[in-house]
Amino acid sequence: MFDKINIAQIVRSHLDTLKNDNTKKAGVDDYLTFLVLPGAIAFALIVFDVRLNERATNIIITSLSILVGLLFNVIVLLFDLVSKNGKRSLKNRILKEVLANITFAVLLAIISIILTLLANLPNTCVVRVVEFCLYFLLSQFLLTSLMVLKRIYLLFRNEIDELERSGTAGNQAEQAIEDD
């Protein structure tokens, strides 16, 4: 019944990108970065009684909505890179991992938007739980976005380097023709 909206594959694919290629397990630093750190941030914000007011709610929803749109555009750029690379398995594997990270970030943003809307419920106890979850997911979104940013940078830089190398070969051939 819910097969069309089942997000388990997105979460599984993202978690698989955190595993070390040699050990096939996520390292301690990955657990610290993507679970403990967001949990500590969320806990600290709750302990220091950081509350969401209407202005903060609007900023969170607007920011996440804009970022989701931008992430969808990055997915289109990745698709273009995949179609150009053909059978280059290592680069395609990295592109698949980045796709998993981006779709996971979009998922985090969508859930965060929903939680932000729920943060205005009248029940204080429920609101505190929702705020903790929201702070946790927003921290994870930020960290995942930074990971995606780094990977996209490296992918595009590699692509530009390859274009420059092939352009250099083309320029050398043109120079050799001109010298004749």
Image (spheres, helix red, strand yellow):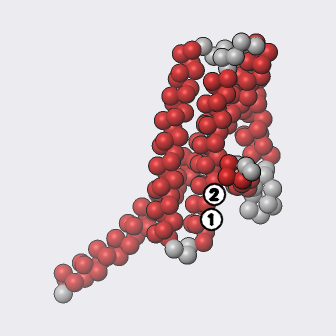
Q: Position of residue 155 (x, y in %)?
A: 51, 58
Q: Which mark is residue 97?
A: 2
Residue at image coords 68%, 33%: 137
Q: Residue furthest bottom?
A: 180
Q: Quadrant of residue 16?
A: bottom right
Few, some or many C-alpha atoms within 10 Å of disc 1 (few <14, some 14-19, many ≥20)?
A: few
On residue 124, the disc is none
The residue pinned by badge 1 equals 93
Q: Position of residue 68 (x, y in %)?
A: 53, 40
Comparing 26 with 92, the one in front is 92
Badge 1 marks a residue whose secondary structure is: helix
**At x 51% / y 53%, what residue is drawn?**
75
Task: Decide: is 7 above or below 91.
Answer: above
User: Residue 156: horizontal and vertical position, in percent?
Assistant: 47, 57
- Image quadrant in which you'd find residue 162: bottom left
The image shows a total of numbered marks equal to 2
Is mark 2 in CB contact (under 8 Å) with mark 1?
yes
